[in-house]
Image (cartoon, rainbow, N blue to C red):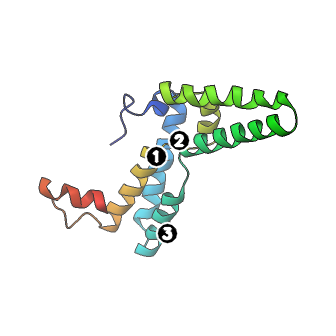
Amino acid sequence: MFQSYETDRVRANTDGAINQRIDREIAENIAYYKGKGQEEIRARIEQLEREWDMERLLETNASALAFTGLLLGVTRNRKWLLLPAVVLPFLFQHAIQGWCPPIPILRRWGIRTREEIDREKYALKALRGDFEHIGSDPENAHQAARL
């Protein structure tokens, strides 16, 4: 059920206790919604679809900081060019290794990977009954991917 550490580099590079806390929160969320109605589950799924994952947060923040440093470096003082010079290698390091210095902080704050968000979302869809029409026929797997 859980994403493999070999394919989820953020989880592989996150302290085990933090991963366990995030997994426990996902399980608690799913358990909470077991007794809820269709509308509440739908609202939670919509909320999960809007949740920013680790990649999106890192990419947005890094590009905003790099752009700000570049803009200020060109218009105000060249020393601002140090900001993109620091931020962009972190983003590159994350792309290559799946880790960079902000990740431990963001994970402690509860920022989840896309796989972790999707795990909760698809469990809620299953609770809602979205997958009952598919059955065990592998031919219908493509239908599940479109839900």
| Residue identified by numbered label 3 | 43
Q: Nearer the viewer, residue 122 or 81?
A: 81
Q: How far apart, in angstroms, are the residues tagged by discs 3 and 1?
A: 18 Å
Q: Residues within 10 Å of mark 3 (few under 14, many from 20)?
A: few
59 over 17 or under it: above or below? below
Residue at (65% x, 34% y) in the render = 105
How far across and down, in percent of the image, does residue 31 sit? Answer: 43, 57
Q: Amino acid at mark 1?
A: Arg
Dot 2: what SS? helix
Residue at (35% x, 33% y) in the render = 4
First in residue order: circle 3 vs circle 1: 3
| Residue identified by numbered label 2 | 55
How far across and down, in percent of the image, does residue 6 sit? Answer: 37, 28
Dot 1: what SS? helix
Looking at the rendered image, the quarter that the C terminus falls into is bottom left
Q: Amino acid at mark 2?
A: Glu
> Residue 47, labelled with which disc?
none
Dot 3: what SS? helix
| Residue identified by numbered label 1 | 114
Q: Residue furthest front?
A: 74
Q: Residues within 10 Å of mark 1 (few under 14, many from 20)?
A: some
First in residue order: circle 1 vs circle 2: 2
